[in-house]
Image: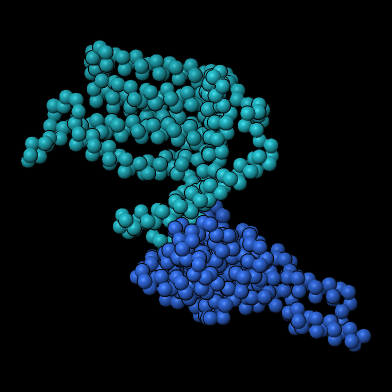
Chain colours: A blue, B cyan
Amino acid sequence: MQIEIKNISYIYDYGNKETYKALDNVSFNVEKGDFLAIVGKTGAGKSTLIQMLNGLLVPDEGEVDVDEFVVSKDKKKRSKKLFLLRKKVGMVFQFPEYQLFEETVLKDVMFGPKNFGMKDEEAMEVAKAALTSVHLSSKFYDRSPFELSGGEKRKVAIAGILASKPEIIVLDEPTAGLDPIAKIDIMNLIKELHDKGTTIVLVTHDMDVVMNYATKVVVLNDSKLMKITTPSALFNEPDVEKYSLEIPTLYKFKRLLKSEGFKKDLKAVNDFDSLIASIVEEKNNG
Amino acid sequence: MDSRVFGKFSNKNTIIHKLDSRLKIFALILLMVIIFLNYGDFANSFAVLGVVSIIIVVIMLIGRVSFLSFLKNLKALWFMMVFLMLINCLIPYGVYTHVMFTFPNGFAIYWEALFNALRVGFRIILMVALTMILTSTTSPLDITYAFEWYLTPLKLVKFPTQVISMTISLALRFIPTLLEEAQRIMRAQKSRGVDYNRGIISKKIKSITTLVIPLLVSCFSRSDELALAMDARGYDPYANRTRYRTLNFGLKDTLFLALLLVISAGFIYLSVLASNFNINFLTYLFKQIGETF
């Protein structure tokens, strides 16, 4: 088990006795190589949860274990060098392009590795490799990150995280505000990383993304863990709306077919190809 | 970084909150003048500042200003305080006579210098308290209205007071937004291995740039967007604006103004007595009390 989340709770204190419980006794595990999607409506506690994975926030109760690191309020239990946890867990926040600050793209990507103790030449090498992996060619190296397009900026920011060679990558809505092509680009990039064996934790509102890419899904609602399951099992539930989630296009389509009197059981049909096949089959059967 | 540090406005139903904001600004200025007046020797000064601090504490209690956030505000000033203390002690000016101790090379540190530094520090603390009372009991909008009102005489010389007040209110409006933004950027940079709390000075400067540059960039893009949004809604800086809320100078404001004027007149009288006639009113007072009993 790579990430173990044990009974964590977190309370935001706004002063004047105004508090808000963002997480309430949440526990689940993430295995190495998982592609985990965290879903839930706004304010469900998703962002709070992921910030604990690299020790930016510390849970008020319970603990988060990432391999040998322990994130806990208890100072005796807590790992001394949470700083190194941030190398292990790469965090891509919403609109990561806001973190760019260097004069050139290459320098910005080198920044992370250098912070984690790499020498200049070594950092430059991993930075170039990271930029290649996000499909940015060498002509970008000396450009200012501020003159790039939105999608390119985001790729540079993601490369800045990849350069530190994290074993786990946490992404908070990586496709928010991008056009459809850039969106597919970024998602394919994440899929490539996952195929290479990186554990992915992804927060998203896009259920099509969950269906197409995730191997596991965690549903949060009102600060509580509702479910941890596979995407197809989740969307095949008849009352999935109770988690305030949108249903992916495929499942909407399946429901529509059912209500129009489609006979074949579609439980096992979880992608468009087999859906089309079963439609053709049913049509041939008359 | 916490947004509460800046003495954020907290809406409570107290008489201080209800006072006219123009009056509150006037009172702030007047009380600051009182704090910085010359009251002769150190004993007098500290006595007067003590009395003023009692007044300020009473106002804070009435206005239910949080003492905790006041202390937090002061914590941010520690560097300035230390700096003041050093400068005041090491660079004596005026006629100092009481030596605290002498360095082997003959350089002396005087008691007066120390007291002077303490007096300056005391004054600054009181000033911070006053400003905090204003900002935490008056909504930013009301403060802007008051500023605009004070600027009205400039209209005679065709000065665009409305533009200035719109700029101020926009600036105030975006403080919490930018703080939030700063926190977001800091989280992202921390994830890239920046440590904002530790490290040697050169590394710290580098960490600050990782925050400041993205913040500036987003500031500019935000202001661009805001300008477009205002244009799209037909904002004309020179048009005559009407407002939803108007400022009313009521009976309680008049009473408060009278009280304020009496108090300040008293302090100014003391100051004149002390500085022009060399009367040490503390000793004078004790002598009077001694004679009565």
Which residue, as the protein is rendered here, is positioned at the far front?
A139
Q: Is residue B160 left or right of residue B124?
A: right
Q: Is residue B236 left or right of residue B160?
A: right
Residue B288 seen in the current view: no
Name the image quarter holding the C terminus of chain B.
top left
Which residue, as the protein is rendered here, is positioned at the far bottom?
A285
x%, y% of residue B173? 56, 40
Q: Is residue B169 left or right of residue A250?
A: left
Report which quarter residue B111 is drawn in.
top left
Report which quarter residue B41 is drawn in.
top left
x%, y% of residue B286? 24, 18
x%, y% of residue A206? 67, 66
Residue at 35% across, 33% down: B124
Taking depth in this image into account, of A72 and B170 the one nearest to the observer is B170
Report which quarter residue A281 is drawn in.
bottom right
Residue at 16% across, 27% down: B96
x%, y% of residue A136? 53, 69
Residue B55 seen in the current view: yes
Position of B23 relative to A83 (above/below): above
Counting every numbered tag in the picture gives 0
Residue at 52% across, 74% down: A133
Residue at 73% across, 79% down: A271
